[in-house]
Image (cartoon, grey):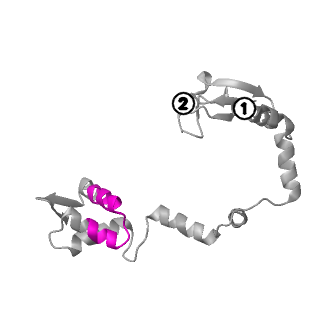
Amino acid sequence: MYAVVGCTDCENLWLLEDARAAETATCPRCGRTHQTKKLRRFVEEESQDAARQARSALLAKQGGNSEAFAETAHVAEMEREIDDRGSVVDDDEYLAGSGLDADAVEAAGERAETGAKTGAGSRIDVVRDALEACDAPTEDDVVAYATERGVPDEKARDLLAKLTRRGEATESGGTYRLL
């Protein structure tokens, strides 16, 4: 048995298999844990395909797209069509079709995950380097050093405050030093 259930926090709808067996269920969108007996069951179906189709219909109705949904094929039929074609557009092909360089997008993603890299290292490393390189550095000295190396002004200030909160740096009389 499959049930289409809804989260009371974020209003996400998802499928729950054998909804009566488990005591709790976690919303895949917001991560809230719900007691399954208290979850609202919008639809209960024997097959997963039927439950998926019901969820799709509910989402279409929720978005005001019931008419468009009525004109589309069943979810299982659309999956079969994709399988029959034998290929799906991959990320690189999609990005190229959008006029973007896939390698540049990947590099930007890596920079975002690790912090913008400069010649000296990550942003927080640049702030640490500023604390070591300057004699009796003030906040303005650290920010000036960091901005010369590609760290935005506000980000440098935030990172300096973070290092101080963590106990990696200390401030006394307006000057900072690494511990």
Q: Circle 1 — which element?
A: loop
Q: Which residue is mark 2?
A: 9
Classify the position of the N terminus by image quarter. top right
Classify the position of the C terminus by image quarter. bottom left
Within 10 angstroms of label 1, few (less than 14), some, or many (20 or more) residues? few
Work out whether residue 25 or residue 151 is closer to the camera in this orientation and state it. Answer: 151
Q: Please say whether residue 121 is one of the residues in the magenta stretch.
A: no
Alpha-carbon span between mark 2 and mark 1: 21 Å
Measuring 29% from the left and 55% from the top, which residue is drawn there? Answer: 162
Measuring 55% from the left and 69% from the top, which residue is drawn there? Answer: 107
On the rendered structure, is 49 left or right of 147? right
Measuring 10% from the left and 59% from the top, which residue is drawn there? Answer: 173
Work out whether residue 17 or residue 15 is closer to the camera in this orientation and state it. Answer: 15
Residue 47 in the image: above or below residue 177: above
The reply to whether the C-beta atoms of the residues labelled 2 and 1 are less than 8 Å apart is no
x then y, percent, for residue 16: 68, 33
Residue type at mark 1: give it. Answer: Gly
Q: Please say whether residue 151 is one of the residues in the magenta stretch.
A: yes
Q: Which residue is mark 1?
A: 64
Residue at the bottom extreme? 119
Q: Nearer the viewer, mark 2 or mark 1?
A: 1
Q: Residue 177 sits in which quadrant?
A: bottom left
Work out whether residue 84 or residue 100 is closer to the camera in this orientation and state it. Answer: 100
- Which residues lie in the magenta part? 143-162
Q: Residue 169 sits in which quadrant?
A: bottom left
x then y, percent, for residue 10: 56, 33
